[in-house]
Amino acid sequence: MNSIRLFLIIFILSLCGCVQTGGDNQVKAAQGYLDLSRWDFAQLGLAPLDGDWEFYQHSINSSDSPRLLLRKTKKDFFPIPSIWRGDTTQGVPLTSQGQGIYHLRVQLAPESGADSLYIAGMLSVCRVWVNGDLVAASGTPGNNIELEIPQKHLLTPNFPRAGRYVDIVLELSNFHNKEGGINSSILIGTRDQIQDLINNRRISGAITGGALLIMGIYHLIIFLMLRSNRENLYFGLFCILWCIGTVFSPSSAFLVTKFFTFDWGWYIKICLLPAGLTVPLLLIFYNSLFPQKYGEKVNLIYLVFGGIYIVYILVSPPSAYSLGPLAYFLVSRTAYVYLFASFINDLRKKRKGAIYLAPGYLALACAELNEVFFDFNIFNSVDFAPYGTFMFILSYSLLMSARFSETLSKYEKISGELETSKKDEHDHKIVHVRLSKMLNTVDEALLAVNSDLIIDFCNGSFEKLSGFQDIKIQGHHLVQLFESNGHHEIEDLLQLLRPQSVAAGKVRKDNFKFPIADGKILNASISMWQMEVENETIYVISVSPAAVVLDKRQLAVQIMNSSIECWEKSADQDKASLATQSGLWNVYMEKDGYSRTQTLDRYLSEETLPSRPRWKNVYATVEFVLANTAARDATYLELEKGIAELKKMS
């Protein structure tokens, strides 16, 4: 908050320094005469030639000089600056188009050194005589639109001094513009002062216009890189339009004419056109930053107004001071009422960043009011507009800086989290590789999960036993995996996986209902223990199917099948040869030459096993196979063990 208060103080001081006031030094012309004999040009600077000038409006084509025409008519007066509206001092009604002659006699101190004029705002063509000499012209005046040729918007004539008095005559004609007259103060001073004024205004315009152009391009580039942030698009376009208005504006001494030549009419149109978009863009920009309830409707209304204004400027003659631009100017300024109300509401709601824009909108409002006062001849300067724009850019820069700082902090935080995540992922991969090497070397069905119950690995034995595949279940949560396969009652398993249970040592649970694929349940014995792999805690679950106790009939079927398997592997012969060579089972030859062992086959399944089996044949078959098998492999050992258990049951 201290930085905001400091900025507000600097802004107010800058605002005070930009306001131009006449004070007690302001003098006015009266009845075509102005006394500047006491005006100190060295201390007070340029003197405005404001006030009532001797004036005569006509529409005749005369070869007489303007000074002579004035002498032939009754004296009448009309003020500068002002446009041709209303009546003269003598009650003569004025027309917006026609010809007019101004005359002013100025008294100067002999040592003043004033020998130059600054004339802008003449509508449309002006010729300047000083002490009877033609010193400047902004084009060719005429009594109709075909003869009138406007060319320039600014005149800075120098004139020779001849005594204490300066006799100034202005010949004006207007057939190209909808309004006539001179709507800017005419200034008098030394050549250096006039040149300094032009240079200062152009330098100020160049700095402001350059800053606006750079800001506009900068924000448009940001928008192209990050299209979701449309505030940059609106602000970039706003800055570029303000840049155009600034370099074409009289307040920058028509800077662009220093480098380029434009058609007189199009120059005025280009000066006026940006206003059709700057106000709508300002509203869209603000409503984008701080969305309002009726923001979109307000944006649409002012876009329509702006569009109508632009079409009007394009299709109508140059009309800087006509009723059309003035009407749009007044209507569009209601946007500031909306902006001010929205801004107060945003401040009341304490919307983040709204306070940063306060000085900028206040400066813009002051700049617009300054132009209003200028148009109504209340203030004689429009120099505050560039400063108002600069203040607005500065306030927006403060807001963007605050947002950028916040975004950068979030970015750094996210970057840190991302680095941590990458490290964890790398460590996890190392853990997985290590676990793969360790667990794939054992025959037990093993499943490994981390402290968050995320599956790290399962070996091939677990895949065969459970029906789950390592590549599909890796990275899944253990609970979600089981629930997605139709198992919802797994509290017993979760109880065993609690850290306090496993940390105490190896945990074993027999006759446990372990969930497997396809919603099936496996009756198994499970063991769980904790291990550390690359500084990560891993819980290993070993799953072993519960041992099945077989009865005598089941065991007989099992060892008969094992006998045939062992015979086929060792002797490389089928069961028919076993029946024939052992002499224990009948063999029937079919017509097709196929040997059938119907009796032996009945002993290979529980369903076909006779109710009263020939136990001696079973024992003898197993013993025959064992006696004729050379390899003492696992199948042989299981068969030997099985026959021993069967004999114990007899």
Image: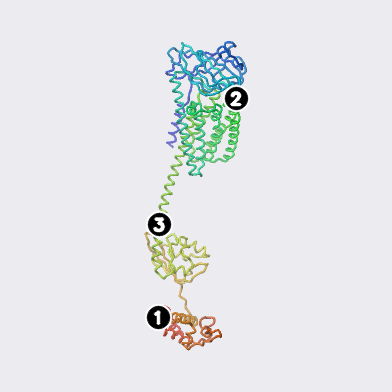
Mark 3 neighbour density, 10 Å: few (under 14) some (14–19) many (20 or more):
few
Q: Tell me, for residue 371, which label it has, or none.
A: none
Gap in angstroms between the C-alphas marked 2 and 3: 76 Å
**Vertical placement of residue 336 versus 482, above or below:** above
Residue 38 x %, y %: 45, 14
* Disc on the earlier residue, 2 or 3: 2
Residue 564 x %, y %: 47, 81
Amino acid carrying mark 1 in the image: Ala
Amino acid carrying mark 3 in the image: His
**Vertical placement of residue 588 versus 59, above or below:** below
**Vertical placement of residue 352 versus 415, above or below:** above
Q: Tell me, for residue 178, which label it has, or none.
A: 2
Asked if the residues shown at circle 1 and circle 2 are in contact, with their CB atoms under 8 angstroms apart, the answer is no
Q: Quadrant of the N terminus?
A: top left
Mark 2 neighbour density, 10 Å: few (under 14) some (14–19) many (20 or more):
some
Mark 1 neighbour density, 10 Å: few (under 14) some (14–19) many (20 or more):
few
Q: Tell me, for residue 631, which label it has, or none.
A: 1
Amino acid carrying mark 2 in the image: Lys
- Residue at x 58% of width, y 14% of height: 63
Gap in angstroms between the C-alphas marked 3 and 1: 48 Å
Gap in angstroms between the C-alphas marked 1 and 2: 119 Å
Secondary structure under tag 3 reads helix
- Given residues 530 and 271, the one toward you in this image is 271
* Disc on the earlier residue, 1 or 2: 2
Residue 335 falls in image quadrant: top right
Q: Which numbered disc, 3 or 1, marks the residue closer to the eye? A: 1
Lateral position of residue 65 relative to residue 624, left or right: right
Q: Tell me, for residue 426, which label it has, or none.
A: 3
Q: Colour scheme in the image? A: rainbow
Secondary structure under tag 1 reads loop
Q: How many marks?
A: 3
